[in-house]
Amino acid sequence: MDIVSGPRVAQIQQGELIFVESFEAWYSREHDRMIATLALSTGDLELAKEGVDEACSRALERWKRVSVLESPSGWVYRVAMNHARRVARRRSFEQRFFQKPTPMPDLPSPAGEVWQLVESLSPRQRQVVMLRHVAELSENEIGVVLGISRGTVSSTLHDAHQHLGRLLGEEEI
């Protein structure tokens, strides 16, 4: 059994015995959810798949370090989002100078009308909502991923819920 394929493995870090989930078990549980989260954040399913695959590849190379982080999924999401941004910038440059712009296809909405309303949120609110409700990260984990405080995450999430509630004609979601 090794850190890549066993279900859980023991590892000694700074003189302390800790148990770490194997990459294989983590990947099986988190991969699809991370693709869904990134696809909703970027609006591009193929870009999301590419970003998550690249980030998972990097995580595997560094699994001994990544696995002991507070949120391995948060680390992978951040790497995937950075990759997606780089690819999107490169595509944008190429489209402006080398190609005629092509319209982006409509992505199927995973949860109906509510997710269409999420698109009306600010980019930060949309990202926080996706990380909380799709990726199921805690407010602390979201703060680490986005580089903001837990209080900012909480406030942003509250404002987003209030905005969505008004759009739905309810007081709160």
Image (cartoon, rainbow, N blue to C red):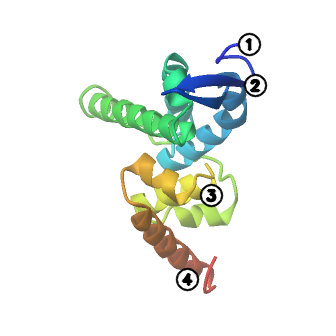
Residue placed at 52% from the left, 59% from the top? 139
Q: Secondary structure at mark 1?
A: loop
Earlier residue among tags 3 and 4:
3
From the viewer's perspective, tell me whether residue 142 is left or right of residue 34.
left
* Amino acid at pointer 3: His
The picture places residue 120, in percent across and down from the top left corner, at 48, 66
Q: Is residue 79 at least partly visible in the picture?
A: yes
Quadrant housing residue 171: bottom right
Which residue is nearer to you in this view: 42 or 63? 63
Q: Residues within 10 Å of mark 4 (few under 14, many from 20)?
A: few
Q: Nearer the viewer, mark 3 or mark 4?
A: 3
Q: Is residue 1 above or below residue 126?
A: above
User: How many angstroms separate mark 2 from mark 3 (CA)?
Assistant: 26 Å
Question: Which of pointers 1 and 4 lies earlier in the amino acid sequence?
Answer: 1
The image shows residue 102 at horizontal and vertical percentages of 42, 37
Q: Are marks 1 and 2 in contact (CB under 8 Å)?
A: yes
- Proximity of marks 2 and 4: CB atoms separated by less than 8 Å: no
